[in-house]
Amino acid sequence: MADVEDGAAGTADAPGVGDASGADGADAEARRTVMRLVFGTMAAQTLGAAARLGVVDALGGEERGVEALAAECAVQPRALVRLLRAMAGLELVEEVRAGVFRATPTGRVLSADHPGSFKTIATVFTDPLMVRSWERLADSVRTGEPAFDQVFGKGFFEHLEERPELSAAFNASMSEGTRTTAAVLPGAYDFARFHTVVDVGGGDGTLLAAVLRAHPALRGVVHDTPRGLAQAPATMERAGVASRCSVVTGDFFASVPAGGDLYLLKSVLHDWDDDRAATLLGNCRQVLPPDGRVLLVEPVLPPLARPGEAGWYLSDLNMLVNLGGLERTRADFEALLARAGFRLSSLAQLPAPSAFSLIEAAPAAG
Ligand SMILES: C[S@@+](CC[C@H](N)C(=O)[O-])C[C@H]1O[C@@H](n2cnc3c(N)ncnc32)[C@H](O)[C@@H]1O
């Protein structure tokens, strides 16, 4: 272990890390980069543990000593100080004096009361639910099939249907990840020309609630599985839009609710391979009036990979191992939409802080 840890700490001449004959500075830098990436899984688990234990919630905005923190988080003080020092190395907390810590602005994002909290994302995306299939990424690359089904004996969403607590956590993590898009989408598209928006695979309703709040004449339907929708009525109540929104359970591979003139799908198509995604879009096409539209909120990959922008490519691999889905380029979306009887009518990047694109599809002529 020693040489691995030395390498991670950036010691160029550590045994087994920087001692290869002829290794120059650039080579040492490359080795440090690789070692940092290898340690990435441990960094992610450090965040996950901090979120699960409520370490940043316990810190609040204060400087706090490790003994008091350990009592509040019900953990062993000597182990907690080790976690906190790893968190300090990751710039989530600062050690202001020996054994006394304060959360950084980055670390505060792991607290439940932060307005843009990613606490549940940190918990769910480091949970065995998400992580175990990654251990078999090489298998998925060999076969092109999701590892999840092998590991858990069933598909991702079937597994969640049987696990209410995990499903609620997953829905909450989706909601956390959707909030930045919910803040900008209502002003970024002309919703006013429609009367009923159906949010297909709408989960806990975070996105549709924001659209309905901003457009008081609009009605909405949020459609998902029973587990997917478990929190949706409460979201609609909280947003004050429940009287304009129906919550409809179903299987979008069988059908989607009729009666809408705009069908909204955020982070849904990327869960599925082209055959499944075309079936789902075909079901939207069946019930769509001639002047209706489908609105996809998805990342759009550039045609060539860009260095230093791993995020969506890692998401693409996450779709592969956990669901058998994929992230798509514009050309991929055009081909997929054509299969389901649509044409891509517009594509635009959503304003920051959303990292998603907005793809509008209209029924294809003929
Ligand atoms: C990645 S989540 C996206 C949730 C939400 N649109 C968002 O962006 O926050 C995918 C959603 O599809 C739902 N889903 C999966 N399979 C489904 C099915 N067969 N029928 C209806 N909904 C399904 C899941 O329950 C989940 O809420």
Image (tube, rainbow, N blue to C red):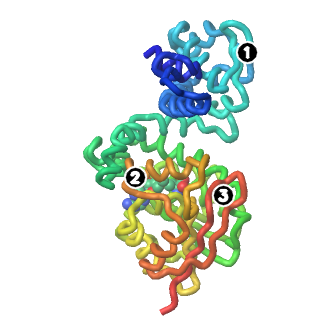
- Do the numbered discs 1 and 2 sit on residues whose CB atoms are within 8 Å? no
Residue 138 shown left or right of residue 236 in the figure: left
Q: Earlier in the sequence, mark 1 or mark 3?
A: 1
For label 1, being within 8 Å of ligand 1 is answered no
Is 191 located above or below residue 141 in the figure? below
- Given residues 340 and 142, the one toward you in this image is 142
As drawn, the label of residue 210 is 3
Position of residue 111 measured from the top left corner of the image (x, y, whole percent) = 63, 30
Name the residue carrying label 2: 320
Name the residue carrying label 1: 63
Find numbered disc 2 in the image and state the secondary structure of the residue it sits on.
Answer: helix
Position of residue 56 measured from the top left corner of the image (x, y, whole percent) = 63, 24
The answer for how far apart the CA atoms under marks 1 and 3 are is 36 Å
User: Label 3 amino acid?
Assistant: Ala
Q: Earlier in the sequence, mark 1 or mark 2?
A: 1
Residue at 54% from the left image edge and 27% from the top image edge: 23
- Given residues 346 and 164, the one toward you in this image is 346
Residue 182 shown left or right of residue 121 in the figure: right
